[in-house]
Amino acid sequence: MTLLTALPDTLSQVTDAAHNEEGNWIIEHVSDHKIFSIPPVNIGGVNIDFSITTNILMMLIASTLLVIVLTYSASSNKKNKHPKGLANFIELVMLFVKDDIVLPSMGKIGVNFLPFFFTMFFFILTVNLLGLIPFMHTATGNVSITASLASVTFVMMMFHGIKKNGFFGYFKGLIPHGVPLYVLPVMVIIEFLSLLTKPFALCIRLFANMTAGHIVILAFISLIFTLGYVIVPVSIAFSLFIYLLEILVALLQAYIFTILSSLFIGMAIEQEH
């Protein structure tokens, strides 16, 4: 009788352990891992770890691929009057970034920022697509990476906004004209918070969208081990659907990050007067 009484509790513990293991497996897959350890370097009293992780490796691979592909495309354009093949495709994407993202958002002044936005778009797109290859990792699924990218946009926004309008002129331009004095303290707080939410929105949007798709795919695959092999056709079908959707999301997130960055920088330079 004792064994029969204890059996439900034992089965419950085994089930809970299986669910915990499943959750740990998903988290383990989307988390960053150290590949090559390097002893920390002390700089200004702060120990900085330069170890190679999966995210750093993916960014190095993406950077190397971009250098090779873009260098080849540039040299091909010099040799041929009309670009062909890969060079033609790269030029098509660059024209899309220029004519459909940067210039509509910033106007003619956006031409000076094209190298920055080309780099941002191609880098985010390449990193996103690399994460869809089996056994690879999505670096933009790490909030530290997306926060760094958003910080670059924030620095560009602040630097060029202050450069164009002056330090006091820039921050003065954040406050709408004609605001009553008794509302001014509240508006200063609101505008300051809205200034900080811009890089925060860039960071979280990219991170959440790139992480969510991978978690959903892994969750569908996990159903096979949770509900049995009967669910295999349904699990595989939904996983493939989400995977194809992730390709669209990878393109879309590179587009959204770039167009929002161009809008924020353009608004900082050309303030309303």
Image: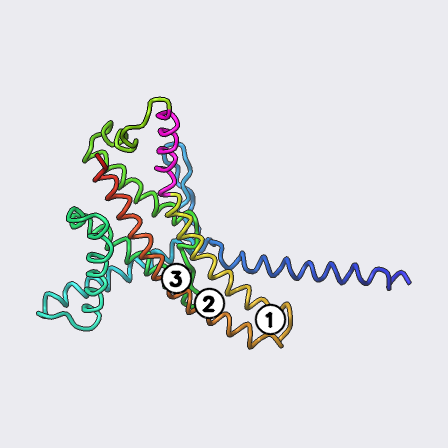
Image position of 80 (left or right of 117): left
Q: Which residues are magenta?
A: 183-199
Query: What element does badge 1 sit on?
Result: helix
Label 2 environment density (alpha carbons within 10 Å; few <14, some 14–19, many ≥20): some
Q: The N terminus lies in which quarter of the figure? A: bottom right
Is residue 54 shown above or below 248? above
Q: CA distance from mark 1 to mark 3?
A: 25 Å
Q: How many marks?
A: 3
The image position of residue 3, as x and y in percent, is 87, 63
The numbered dot on residue 224 is 1
Residue at 60%, 61% (x, y): give it: 22
Magenta residues, dominant SS class: helix
The image position of residue 134, as x and y in percent, is 44, 68
Q: Give the residue type at disc 1.
A: Ile
Q: Earlier in the sequence, mark 2 or mark 1?
A: 1
Q: Earlier in the sequence, mark 1 or mark 3?
A: 1
Q: Give the residue type at disc 3.
A: Val
Label 3 environment density (alpha carbons within 10 Å; few <14, some 14–19, many ≥20): many
The numbered dot on residue 249 is 3
Image position of 232 (left or right of 128): right
Residue at 18%, 35% (x, y): give it: 164
The numbered dot on residue 242 is 2
* Magenta residue check for 184: yes
Residue at 42%, 69% (x, y): give it: 244
- Which sits in the foreground, 264 or 131? 264
Q: Give the residue type at disc 2.
A: Ile
- Colour setting: rainbow
